[in-house]
């Protein structure tokens, strides 16, 4: 996970706010059937795994994969497609995402992409599918993903380390980023998370990880929750979903994290941070779990807890 150099805490806050506005504009819950004639959740997950392999083979940025999956889910939410067209839809979304995220010289020619992906579709078929996707999505492919929010939240933690995580070193906090990103990759194939906003998934993941790192996890969770305007019930439900997922897939997550660390080479992408008007965020700490919040031992809750630049 790479944070833009020179980014300040205030700029990270406004960046998250920018993501929230995009999320509110574009995101809608998506649900796949477990059986029937349309594309099923299991088939969708296979397509996502295939795109994950393609993303790794082409050495694309992770943002490309997350945007491609987001476009895939958005499109399939709007149309009734047969399973035989799923691979064509998936590779078309992937190609569109690569042209948005990756530098031009990194994007292969469509013929090479067809050969590398081993999909049985012609250039004209994929170009025709691209046009259908663009039309259905109103020619607007600017989507905010859970990875975007994860980057924003992690940037806030790093930039406010002495305030939020004084017991953690800068190196430890930097190492937390790739670990969370690896786990977020696993979440791409968890269909139950498609009914949760990307901001909620990222926030729940950060909260779950911080719980094993620091006693201040509760305060930080509520601080980020207020910033992201996330409901208590949504955070709790998503935390529970993630906890179940990682309990089952813990060995897999560990292996994938070691693999990602050994192959992590940051590359430039077209998506850049933007400066916007600064809005101060003052968080009145409330009980995330209602009455159960009183049971958090050793937790000092202040009346106002700002996320600010140091």
Image: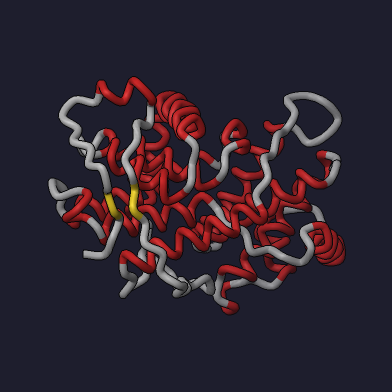
In the figure, is residue 251 to the left or right of 164?
right
Q: Is residue 22 left or right of residue 304?
A: right
Residue 126 coordinates in the image, percent (x, y): 81, 61
Please say whether residue 59 is visible from this viewpoint: no
Compare residues 29 and 147 and report the one nearer the observer: 29
Residue 14 found in image quarter: bottom left
Q: Residue at x 37, y 32 (%)?
A: 288
What residue is at 18 percent from the left and 57 percent from the top?
Answer: 170
Quadrant in the picture for residue 280: bottom left
Looking at the picture, how far across and down is residue 36, in whole percent? Answer: 83, 26
Relative depth, front residue between 185 and 30: 30
Q: Quadrant of the N terminus?
A: bottom left
Q: How many marks?
A: 0
From the top left corner, tell me how far across and down residue 131 is, in percent. Answer: 83, 65
Which of the 4 image quadrants contains residue 47?
Answer: top right
Q: Position of residue 115 (x, y in %)?
A: 70, 61
Q: Residue at x 28, y 40 (%)?
A: 219
Q: Is residue 24 visible?
A: yes
Does 235 sit above or below residue 289?
below
Name the one closer to the observer, 51 or 283.
283
Residue at position x 27%, y 51% in the image: 175
Is 86 located above or below residue 35 in the figure?
below
């Amino acid at each position: 996970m790479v944070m833009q150099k020179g980014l300040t805490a205030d700029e990270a806050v406004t960046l998250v706010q920018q993501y929230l506005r995009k999320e509110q504009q574009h995101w809608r819950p998506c649900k796949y059937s477990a059986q029937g004639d349309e594309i099923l959740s299991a088939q969708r997950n296979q397509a996502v795994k295939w795109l994950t392999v393609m993303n790794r083979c082409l050495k694309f940025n992770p943002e490309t994969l997350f945007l491609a999956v987001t476009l895939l889910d958005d499109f399939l939410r709007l149309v009734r497609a047969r399973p035989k067209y799923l691979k064509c839809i998936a590779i078309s979304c992937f190609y569109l995402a690569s042209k948005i995220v990756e530098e031009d010289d990194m994007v292969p020619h469509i013929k090479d992409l067809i050969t590398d992906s081993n999909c049985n579709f012609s250039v004209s078929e994929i170009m025709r599918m691209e046009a259908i996707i663009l039309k259905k999505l109103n020619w607007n492919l600017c989507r905010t993903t859970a990875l975007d929010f994860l980057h924003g939240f992690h940037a806030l933690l790093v930039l406010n380390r002495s305030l939020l995580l004084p017991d953690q070193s800068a190196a430890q906090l930097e190492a937390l980023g790739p670990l969370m990103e690896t786990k977020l990759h696993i979440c791409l194939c968890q269909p139950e998370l498609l009914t949760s906003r990307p901001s909620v998934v990222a926030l729940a993941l950060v909260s779950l990880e911080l719980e094993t790192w620091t006693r201040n996890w509760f305060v930080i969770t509520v601080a980020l929750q207020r910033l992201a305007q996330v409901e208590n019930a949504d955070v709790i439900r998503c935390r529970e979903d993630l906890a179940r997922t990682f309990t089952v897939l813990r060995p897999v997550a560990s292996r994938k994290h070691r693999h990602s660390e050994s192959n992590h080479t940051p590359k430039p992408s077209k998506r850049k941070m933007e400066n916007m008007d600064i809005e101060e965020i003052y968080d009145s700490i409330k009980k995330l779990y209602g009455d159960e919040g009183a049971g958090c031992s050793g937790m000092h809750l202040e009346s106002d807890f700002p996320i600010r630049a140091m």
